[in-house]
Amino acid sequence: MSLFNMSAVKNHPRRSGFDLSNRICFTSKAGELLPVFWDIVYPGDSFKIKTQLFTRTQPLNTAAYTRIREYLDFYFVPLRLINKNLPTALVQMQNNPVQATGLSSNKIVTTDIPWTSISGAGYSNLNGINALYHGSKDFSDLLGFNSLTQSAKLLMYLRYGNFLPSNANIAKSASIGLSSTLDLRSSESTSTGYTSIHILPLAAYQKVYADFFRFTQWEKNQPYTYNFDWYSGGNVLASLTTVALAEKYFSDDNLFTLRYANWPKDMFMGVMPDSQLGDVSIVDASGSEGTFPVGLMDVNDGTMRAGLLARSGSAPSEQSSLEMRAERVRSVLSHNVCVY
């Protein structure tokens, strides 16, 4: 055999298998989008997914003869959709920028993964939720639940821990019941240092909602809740330096917002926010002398007279023929039909 013939040299890699099956117990309310499992996957990983679901309703005097639909969906969120520099940061290739900050400058590639601290001074950490919780500001969402307790619930389901105090207010925590034994802040202090955690599960959760559950006709996309292309290292919550900034951030939709699924579209839920998804079509009757076809209502008998020829600066008069071709009229109408 020739020394330069490498056909016999082959690599036979073996694939390792791991049993990731587990039992997840959680409490949910109707419409909530709850992330009950997440994991970091690598190129080439494959999963065999099989789910079993058992639901127990709240005890009643008699059996609840009702229909409950529960869905378990699995989504894959590429890290590059959260931050374009994440693949570069993970392999620590700082000399391979993929973004520019100006006409002649590249964005600095950092090896940091977007992170924040569990606790610390101020509001630039997850403990800021606890600090705001005891304030006087009302953080009620559209459904009347406290958005801070909802954020704490989302953090718990993503396995970050419990960020509500053991003396939580009953009225503010009406939407959830959390155990005080999961408080990770009890083991941390300024002397031991505070644990820093990445926010990739939170960003992936918000990205899934924006792409698959958002009601696009009524809800605008909010990339600031999941996209970190602007990130150049450090704490992602470092800008929350005052209580006013923290209250403004947690009052609006943010990285920690617990989402709800929308109702299925029907005659009511499918209503458009406005006609033609834009401004109402109007005919400009001002300007220089000219003619145009328009439909007008006769003020004398209240009937609609279509096909009148209006002339700028003068009263409309009925004409036997229009100066616009019929094909053009049909084209205009086909682009301006609004169904109610």
Image (cartoon, rainbow, N blue to C red):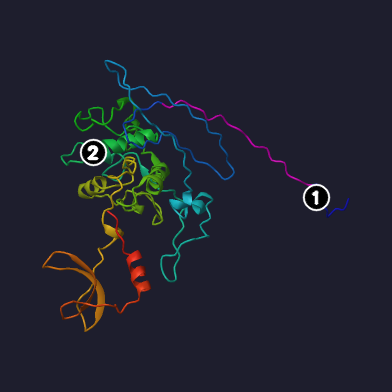
Give the farthest residue toward the front: 320
Q: Quadrant of residue 195?
A: top left
Can you say whether 41 is above or below 83 in the image?
above
Tag 2: residue type?
Leu
**Within-10-Å neighbours for mark 1: few <14, some 14–19, many 20+:** few
Return the residue nearer the eye: 268 or 112.
Answer: 268
Question: Can you identify the residue that label 1 sits on?
Answer: 7
Q: Which mark is residue 143?
A: 2
Where does the image place residue 234, in percent across and percent down from the top left? 38, 51
Residue at (29% x, 16% y) in the render:
62
Q: Is residue 48 left or right of residue 3?
A: left
Q: Is residue 191 left or right of residue 47?
A: left
Q: Secondary structure at mark 2?
A: loop
Report if residue 173 is visible in the image. yes
Where does the image place residue 327, in percent across and percent down from the top left? 38, 72
The magenta stretch spans which residues? 9-24
Can you say whether 184 is above or below 121 in the image?
above
